Image (spheres, rainbow, N blue to C red):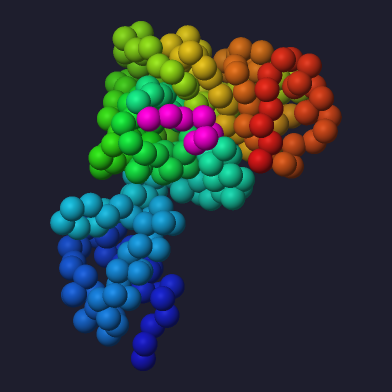
Amino acid sequence: MKITPAQRHNHIKELLAKDIAFTVSELAVKFNVSEMTIHRDLNKLEKQGHIQRVHGGVLPTERMEFEFDFANKRATNRKFKQAIAKSALTLIEPGQRLILDTGTTTLELAYLLKNFPNLTVITPSLAVASVLQFADGVETILLGGSIRHGSPDLTGAVAEHVLDMFAVDIAFQGADAIGDDGRIYNIDVRMARVDQKIRQRAAQTHILCDSSKIGSTSLAANGSLRDVDSLITDSNISQEYIDRFEKLGTKLTIV
C-alpha cells in the first residue's frame, strides 16, 4: 500500500533524526516512487525549514531546536513571524554586517538569509548559527558565552565582552514582551544585558515582535522603543498601541 506524501516526509525526518544516511535512489526504492518525487519531497522539506540540502547529503535543521525545546515556540504565530521577517529582509543589502539576536522571529529571518550574497552575521543564537552554517554567501560568527538553560541562547560576561569587538550596520532583535509604555523586556536578566550591548554596537536596531507580546511585561527591561529605529509587527496590533508607540518617536512597520 502506497503511503501519502505527508507520511513520506515524516519518515524522511525520522531517518535524519536517527542519523541514518540515505541516497535519493534508496529513498525512491524504499517508498516505491520515482527519484523526481523524492527530489520534490526534499525540496518541500527544505522550503518548510525541516532540512538543509548540502553537497553530498541532507541535514536536519530542527534537531538543535528540539534539543532546546524550541520547536513549539517557533510554531506559535509562525505566519506572522514569517511576514515580519520578510519585511525585515527589505532593510538588508549585500555587504552589510548584521547582528541577529535570539528568538524565533529572528530565526525566521535567518532562513531568508540562507541564499543572500555577501553578508556577515553575528549571533548569540545557536539556532540561528545552525541555519546559516552552510550558507555560502554568509560569514557567520557565533558569540561565545554560557548556554541559557532550556534555550539555544549564549549569554553572560563572555558574550558581552566579545560584542565589544564588533561594529555592525543593523541589529535585529526580538522581544519577550513590550509594555504599555514601550519598554522592551527579556525573560532572563543575562539576556537583557546582551541585548543592551547589541544595540550599542549597531548603527541601526530594529525590533521584530509579533503583536501577541505587546502590552505585557517580563522579568528584565533592556530598554525602550525610544532606543530603537523601528518596530516591525503584525496587523493584529491594536490602534491604541499604534498611537502610544508613535508618540515615542519609533517608526512602526505593520505587516
Provide the residue span drawn in magenta: 88-94
Q: Quadrant of the N terminus?
A: bottom left
Which of the 4 quarters of the picture holds residue 137?
top left
Residue 184 among magenta residues: no
Looking at the picture, does residue 52 appear above or below residue 217? Answer: below
Q: Nearer the viewer, residue 106 or 1?
A: 106
Q: Residue at x 27, y 65 (%)?
A: 15
Q: Position of residue 70 (x, y in %)?
A: 45, 43
x and y percent of residue 90 in the render?
52, 35
Front residue of this view, candidates 220 and 45: 45
Q: Residue at x 27, y 81 (%)?
A: 34
Q: Kindly identify the residue that appears in the image at 19 percent across and 58 percent down.
A: 57
Relative horizontal placement of residue 194, taking residue 249 as reference (left or right)? left
Q: Quadrant of the C terminus?
A: top right
* Residue 87 in sight: yes
Task: Please tell me in which quadrant of the rendered image residue 11 appears.
Answer: bottom left
